[in-house]
């Protein structure tokens, strides 16, 4: 039997009264890609911080290559051969590639930097990750997210990484970048590196992982071989219940046109010439590659980007307008950038949910906290949003629950037209299932939903029609039943 590369046994970690890890066990073999799966808040991040040395466990045991392992700091963990590549990249943008590769671990020749040795090692590391064409002196700010991610992996390889943790590594990558990353992962697996792969996308897990472990509520609840299980098996372990249909579809009756775009063009060239009609009671998806202009289309409709030609009609109102005017016309938007643009992270759930629509929360423009909380409670209960109260900070919620608040804001404002840009990005399967159910119910009730998504199974499963964007051009929307994922990709890459 193969000796495990890494053993974590009965690891516990609490923060005051909160039990983040209630006894987690994890086994990673040499040269395997192991998926760590779980809903947001299941304990994945805490477990990896214990592994890296960022957190000290309250109890439990860790063994690395048959030797006791208990790093006091992330630096000690890195020295032992454990490397973390976080979803939010940690590169110093103002430094060069070479300086980033050796930051904190500079090679010395007496009292001086050994620049010759560092440059030689940097070139070897860059070649290993397929970036031999990049000059080590290039400033990090000039590189793409995909290149920066590969450079972070190269940094871990320079110092003989034995366990590499990849946290949501594809969240900001194109399809081509993802395939390059997967090729590198397979190469490292062949070289004996053990990889812990954290992802909410089960298709990625199936494409690149050997085995999986599922966490739920701070405990490990199942492990097995990826090839020997179904997606339903994994989802059942994640949420602790059956999820019979990830994409529910109630009978929907498309009604009047409530959003009408004609030859819309925005400053910057995206969209360049977009026409579509969105009806009550339908979900219309916008597909396309990253940079195609999908987000710019939604921003132009909502008044965030300047329209230079064409027309917009929302309900009975025609013409361009500001976001405030869009709210008044019962049109709301959920941004793809939840942290920087979609939510006021330093404010409460109640403030975030009611900010665009403060009517009836107090006399003469005042907001009474009691009325505000009462207005939020039906949405907190119905969606549902897992929180202690409407007064809790939005930052205290998981990503999935934060996204539910962003959608609830539109419902509180009684929006008829919902513009949703990547509404399930970065959230777990359980939360996705709840949001899909909510969107299905809203469409059934007559809401009109325009949804941008990079995830084709999501569009195919939830939408009635799909329109594809390519280089700022919007193709005509077609019924989902007339499309395949191949058809969508052909249009997405067309010129």
Image (spheres, helix red, strand yellow):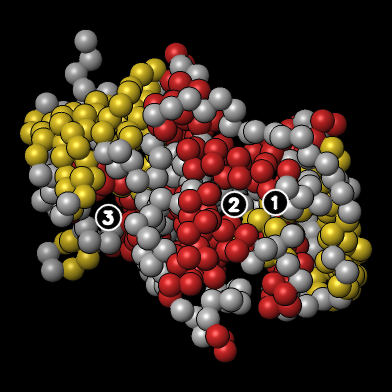
Residue 229's spot in the image, x, y percent?
46, 17
Residue 379's spot in the image, x, y percent?
53, 56
Viewer-proximal residue among 200 and 367: 367
Determine whether, in the image, residue 165 is placed left or right of residue 322: left
Q: Residue at x 10, y 44 (%)?
A: 58
- Is 150 drawn above or below residue 202 in the view shown? below
Determine whether, in the image, residue 437 is placed left or right of residue 123: right
For marks 1 and 3, give the CA distance.
51 Å
Point out the tag, 1 or 3, that comes first from the N-terminus: 3
Q: Residue at x 18, y 61 (%)?
A: 108
Q: Which residue is mark 3?
A: 117
Residue 127's spot in the image, x, y percent?
44, 44
User: Can residue 287 be seen in this snapshot?
Assistant: no
Cβ atoms under marks 2 and 1 closer than 8 Å: yes
Pick out the residue farthest to the top.
1
- Is 32 drawn above or below residue 51 in the view shown? above
Secondary structure at numbered mark 2: loop
Q: In the rendering, which numbered label is found on residue 166?
A: none
Point out the tag, 2 or 1, that comes first from the N-terminus: 2
Q: In the rendering, which numbered label is found on residue 451?
A: 1
Which circle, 1 or 3, is nearer the viewer? 1
Secondary structure at numbered mark 1: strand
Q: In the rendering, which numbered label is found on residue 423?
A: 2
For marks 2 and 1, give the CA distance.
8 Å
Point out the tag, 2 or 3, that comes first from the N-terminus: 3
For marks 2 and 3, give the CA distance.
47 Å
Cβ atoms under marks 2 and 3 closer than 8 Å: no
Which circle, 2 or 3, is nearer the viewer? 2
């Amino acid at each position: 039997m193969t000796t495990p590369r890494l053993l974590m046994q009965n690891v516990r970690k609490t923060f005051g009264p909160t039990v983040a890890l209630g006894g987690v066990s994890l086994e990673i073999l040499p040269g395997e890609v192991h998926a760590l799966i779980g809903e947001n808040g299941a304990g994945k991040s805490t477990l990896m911080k214990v592994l890296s040395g960022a957190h000290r466990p309250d109890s439990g045991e860790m063994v690395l290559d048959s030797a006791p392992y208990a790093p006091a700091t992330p630096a000690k963990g890195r020295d032992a051969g454990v490397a973390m590549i976080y979803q939010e990249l940690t590169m110093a943008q103002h430094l060069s590639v070479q300086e980033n590769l050796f930051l904190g671990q500079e090679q010395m020749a007496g009292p001086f930097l050994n620049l010759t040795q560092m440059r030689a090692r940097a070139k070897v590391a860059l070649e290993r990750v397929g970036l031999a064409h990049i000059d080590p002196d290039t400033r990090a700010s000039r590189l793409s997210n995909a290149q920066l991610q590969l450079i972070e992996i190269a940094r871990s390889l320079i110092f003989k990484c034995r366990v590499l943790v990849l946290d949501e590594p594809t969240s900001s990558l194109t399809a081509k970048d993802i395939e390059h990353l997967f090729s590198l992962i397979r190469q490292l697996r062949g070289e004996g590196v053990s990889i812990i792969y954290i992802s909410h996308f089960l298709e990625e897990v199936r494409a690149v992982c050997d085995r999986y472990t599922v966490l739920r509520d701070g405990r490990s609840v199942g492990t097995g071989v990826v090839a020997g299980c179904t997606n339903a098996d994994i989802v059942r372990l994640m949420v602790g219940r059956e999820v019979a249909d990830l994409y529910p579809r109630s009978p929907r009756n498309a009604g009047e046109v409530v959003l009408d775009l004609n030859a819309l063009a925005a400053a910057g060239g995206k969209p360049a010439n977009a026409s579509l009609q969105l009806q009550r009671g339908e979900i219309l998806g916008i597909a396309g590659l990253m940079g195609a202009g999908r987000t710019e289309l939604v921003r132009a409709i909502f008044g965030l980007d300047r329209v230079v030609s064409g027309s917009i009609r929302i309900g009975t109102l025609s013409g361009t307008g500001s976001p405030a005017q869009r709210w008044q016309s019962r049109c709301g938007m959920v941004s793809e950038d939840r942290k920087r643009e979609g939510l006021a992270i330093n404010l409460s759930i109640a403030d975030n949910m009611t900010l665009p629509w403060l009517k009836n929360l107090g006399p003469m423009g005042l907001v009474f906290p009691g009325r505000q909380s009462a207005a939020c409670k039906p949405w907190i209960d119905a969606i549902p949003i897992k929180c202690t109260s409407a007064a809790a900070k939005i930052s205290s919620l998981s990503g999935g629950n934060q996204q539910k608040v962003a959608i609830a804001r539109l419902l509180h404002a009684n929006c008829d037209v919902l513009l949703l840009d990547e509404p399930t990005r970065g959230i777990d399967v359980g939360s996705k299932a709840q949001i899909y159910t909510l969107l299905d119910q809203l469409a059934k009730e007559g809401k009109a939903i325009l949804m941008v998504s990079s995830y084709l199974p999501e569009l195919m499963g939830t939408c009635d029609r799909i329109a594809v964007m390519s280089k700022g051009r919007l193709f005509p929307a077609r019924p989902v039943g007339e499309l395949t994922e191949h058809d969508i990709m052909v249009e997405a890459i067309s010129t």
